Amino acid sequence: MFDYHKTMETVELAKIFKALSNEQRLNLFKMLYQWNSEAEGEEYVCYDGVDRCFTKACCSLPLSRSTVSHHFKELQNAGLITVTRSGQCFCCKINQDAVQAIRDFLKAL
């Protein structure tokens, strides 16, 4: 029987699903996830020069820089990514614990 009481896990999952309910943000997260997978073994995905993570995302999506920035912040607030800044470079890392929580939730259905 399912326990309907709010737990920290369900509150966090609700934040995650709310963040991913936006089509543009879902596409951005998918793109960042793929970039992280390609850079496996590196702590952060960080691009030099023109190919910085944020700049690459802006060039890859038909969105304004301010919209991409907003989506980065929403993904970060939901705990899906961490973003660090090194000079002018924004480095992103997918929170694998959040991805695993999504997988576990869907498997339990």
Image (cartoon, rainbow, N blue to C red):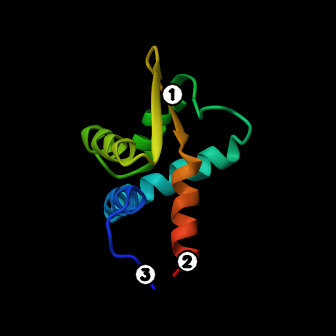
Amino acid type, label 1: Val
Q: First in sequence: mark 1 or mark 2? A: 1
Q: Which residue is painted at 48% across and 38% down in the image?
A: 56
Return the residue nearer the eye: 94 or 55.
94
Coordinates of residue 7 in the picture (x, y in percent): 37, 61
Callout 1 secondary element? helix
Q: First in sequence: mark 3 or mark 1? A: 3
**Residue occupied by mark 2:** 108
Position of residue 11 in the picture relative to residue 59 (left or right):
left
For the N terminus, the image quarter is bottom left
**Label 3 neighbour load within 10 Å: few <14, some 14-19, many 20+:** few
Q: Residue 65 carries which label?
A: none
**Residue occupied by mark 3:** 2
Q: Residue furthest right?
A: 41
Q: Mark 3 against mark 2, which lies toward the viewer?
A: 3
Amino acid type, label 3: Phe
Callout 3 secondary element? loop
Return the residue nearer the eye: 78 or 50.
78
**Residue occupied by mark 1:** 50
Q: Mark 3 against mark 1, which lies toward the viewer?
A: 3
Figure quadrant of residue 94: top right
Q: Is residue 16 above or below residue 38?
A: below
Q: Which residue is painted at 45% across and 48% down in the image?
A: 80
Marks 1 and 2 sit apart, C-alpha to C-alpha, by: 42 Å
Q: Mark 1 against mark 2, which lies toward the viewer?
A: 2
Figure quadrant of residue 73: top left
Q: Is residue 19 above or below residue 60?
A: below
Position of residue 106 in the picture relative to residue 11 (left or right):
right
